[in-house]
Image (tube, rainbow, N blue to C red):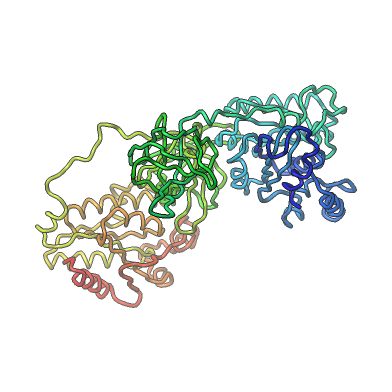
């Protein structure tokens, strides 16, 4: 029997209501390591009499074997289910628990306190109405407390219950509780956490968990359970403008076509007008259907199928809206909670998933990083793992969105690395970034095709990539000279030469390399638009950056050439003495030594300049251009 079934079985404890008819409160527990989060949740379950007999028996036996509380019951074992959690006495994954009282149903997400599991905490908090923040009375507010509170504020969790735990270890000192409460309320005011209740507890013994504690007579506020049962977390989402992200165009036969999804906010009635975004097409709702009935209205949280009066194009990723319209933009300002061990890089391409939409995205600018200890905004080039910052993000196509403070569903997103498929960040939209209204594309009469006809060639970019010393510049120079002899019009962009001018302000950090490649790709695109065959000689070590450069060009205009000379050969050549300096520790971030080189997956041309001469390699490239009718 599950806990949920147990709730139903114990319905007789409430003489007036069935458990499933009561309102549900979703809450998350968070705080630093070993502050007692799992113990508090376990104590809530135990003292609420929500445990079955076999669960009590298992808790008793497990406490003797894996407990950390001596002969007493270890209530954390009710939540910590992973073997690693029990061995270390910590929470690693998010654990969900369900129970009910006479007034409410509760869904608890117990989250880990370790910094390295910040992503798990953010996941648990993303759907919470209220947060229970645990603080060890001996330690007070620590960095992880601030980090979790900042994440709660970003995620729109405005109701916070601060459980100052382990009061028995400070002799139930009222002044200690008052000092911690004052510090918490000051921090909450800075973050915009508007509803904060502080409760002194001793979770192991159950003090102020269900009932008021006789050992703290100086505290006259509610217990943890009393506050959870009474707190009003309604945010009026049903009264907000209607939003309906389309999950599926439902057409089981020729007679029926509906749009299925879940109502993100607002209320919709049959006959109401709606607009489909981003297309802007308008219609009216002719029907609202569920699996077993027809409805006259749909409210926030309901999963329904909407029938429209007109046959208009709408599919997954579109949003139906009414009332004040959402934003439709291809550039946003957002806060990121960075998860990945590899730092965020401006200019790097990611996949943004928001609601039912998936869009290519580039972090175009870093605005600031949040210093967790001081809450100050700091200038920073990137975000490291578990850091929080504000960024600008450019999108491949328009996204239908609201600010996160107005709508969680349309205001939140995740970023995914397109190669590893790892979720690297959670994002919260602050606002669309408006383009200046007076900037537009100016039409030109002479286009790329006209310039190519004048030059009697097909413009393209030859992008030579490889390790330092692989022979890229030598080969590019020979190809340039050979094409010049054939009467072709070319331009040569060499990485070292560009660093004397347009890129002289850039270093060799991963972020600077991304910007270096972005600028070179933009210049090369201008040359291709002028009808030239453009040669680029650049280490360009990261596959994602080269792929971003490729997307700047049309089909067939980007020819990637991997000069695949082995590292040993490049190091033996060492024409500039750079490998020697890197081995001696005089150069950091040197590709091939302490920074990786990501070889192309499917280059158009591969050349081993350690096995063939530079002249032969150049002829191979010229021959490719002839065979593909570029010249």
Q: From the viewer's perspective, tell me whether residue 612 is left or right of residue 626.
A: right
User: Left or right: 129 with respect to 327?
Assistant: right
User: Can residue 75 be seen in the rendering of this structure?
Assistant: yes
- In this rendering, the answer to whether 355 lies above or below 166 is below
Q: Residue furthest left?
A: 454
Quarter of the image with the C terminus is bottom left
**Quadrant of residue 211 in the image?**
top right
Residue 64: percent from the left, percent from the top? 87, 53
Q: In the image, is 11 to the left or to the right of 540?
A: right
Q: Farthest right residue?
A: 71
353, above or below 614, in the image: above
Q: Position of residue 113 (x, y in %)?
A: 68, 44
Q: Is residue 384 visible?
A: no
Q: Is residue 133 left or right of residue 438?
A: right
Establish if 306 lies above or below 323. Answer: below
* Whole-percent x, y for residue 222 in the image: 76, 26
- Asked where in the image residue 219 lies, by quadrant, the reply is top right
Query: Which residue is at a point 45% across and 42% down the rendered structure image?
Result: 306
Rendered location of residue 204, percent (x, y):
83, 40
Residue at the spot x=63%, y=48% of the render? 117
Q: Looking at the image, is 303 positioned above or below residue 237?
A: below
Between 199 and 99, the residue placed more toward the observer is 99
Report the front residue among 562 and 236.
236
Q: How many marks?
A: 0
């Amino acid at each position: 029997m599950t806990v949920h079934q147990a709730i139903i079985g114990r319905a007789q404890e409430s003489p007036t209501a069935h458990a499933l008819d009561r309102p549900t409160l979703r809450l998350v527990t968070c705080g630093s390591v070993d502050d007692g989060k799992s113990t508090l949740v376990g104590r809530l379950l135990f003292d609420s009499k929500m445990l079955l007999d076999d669960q009590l028996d298992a808790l008793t036996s497990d406490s003797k074997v894996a407990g950390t509380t001596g002969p007493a019951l270890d209530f954390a074992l009710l939540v910590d289910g992973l073997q690693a959690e029990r061995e270390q006495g910590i929470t690693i994954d998010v654990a969900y628990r369900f129970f009910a009282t006479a007034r409410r149903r509760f869904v608890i997400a117990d989250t880990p306190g370790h910094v390295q599991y910040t992503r798990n905490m953010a996941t648990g908090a993303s759907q919470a109405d209220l947060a229970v923040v645990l603080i060890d009375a001996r330690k007070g507010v620590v960095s992880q407390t601030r980090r979790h509170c900042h994440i709660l504020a970003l995620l729109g969790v405005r109701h916070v219950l601060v459980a100052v735990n382990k009061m028995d270890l400070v002799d139930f000192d009222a002044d200690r509780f008052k000092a911690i409460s004052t510090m918490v309320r000051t921090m909450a005011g800075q973050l915009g956490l508007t509803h904060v209740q502080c409760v002194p507890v001793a979770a192991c013994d159950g003090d102020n968990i269900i009932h008021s504690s006789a050992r703290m007579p100086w505290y006259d506020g509610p217990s943890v359970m009393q506050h959870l049962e009474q707190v009003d977390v309604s945010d009026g989402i049903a009264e907000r403008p209607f939003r309906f992200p389309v999950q599926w165009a439902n057409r089981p036969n020729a007679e029926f076509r509906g749009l299925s999804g879940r109502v993100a906010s607002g209320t919709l009635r049959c006959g109401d007008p709606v607009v489909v975004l981003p297309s802007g097409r308008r219609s009216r709702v002719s029907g609202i259907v569920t699996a077993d009935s027809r409805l006259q209205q749909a409210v926030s949280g309901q999963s329904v199928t909407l029938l429209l009066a007109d046959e208009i194009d709408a599919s997954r990723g579109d949003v139906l809206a009414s009332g004040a319209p959402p934003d439709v933009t291809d550039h946003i300002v957002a806060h990121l909670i960075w998860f990945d061990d590899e730092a965020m890089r401006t200019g790097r391409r990611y996949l943004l998933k928001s609601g039912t939409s998936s869009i290519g995205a580039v972090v175009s600018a870093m605005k600031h990083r949040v210093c967790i200890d001081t809450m100050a905004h700091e200038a920073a080039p990137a975000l490291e793992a578990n850091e929080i910052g504000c960024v600008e993000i450019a999108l491949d196509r328009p996204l239908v969105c609201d600010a996160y403070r107005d709508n969680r569903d349309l205001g939140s997103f995740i970023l995914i690395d397109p190669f590893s498929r790892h979720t690297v960040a959670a994002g919260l939209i602050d606002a669309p970034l408006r383009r200046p209204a007076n900037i537009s594309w100016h039409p030109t009469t002479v286009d790329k095709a006209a310039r190519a006809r004048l030059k009697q060639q097909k413009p393209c970019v030859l992008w030579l990539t490889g390790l330092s010393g692989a022979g890229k510049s030598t080969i590019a120079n020979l190809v340039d000279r050979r094409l010049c002899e054939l009467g072709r019009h070319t331009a040569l962009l060499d990485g070292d030469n560009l660093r004397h001018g347009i890129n002289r302000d850039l270093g060799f950090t991963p972020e600077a390399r991304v910007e270096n490649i972005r600028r070179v790709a933009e210049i090369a695109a201008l040359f291709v638009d002028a009808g030239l065959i453009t040669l680029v000689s650049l280490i360009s070590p990261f596959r994602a950056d080269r792929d971003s450069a490729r997307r700047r060009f049309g089909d067939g205009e980007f020819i990637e050439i991997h000069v695949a000379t082995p590292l040993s050969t490049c190091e033996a050549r060492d024409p500039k003495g750079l490998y020697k300096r890197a081995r001696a520790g005089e150069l950091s971030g040197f590709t091939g030594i302490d920074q990786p080189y990501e070889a192309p997956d499917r280059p158009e041309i591969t050349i081993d300049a350690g096995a063939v001469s530079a002249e032969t390699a150049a002829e191979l490239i010229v021959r490719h251009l002839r065979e593909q009718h570029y010249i």
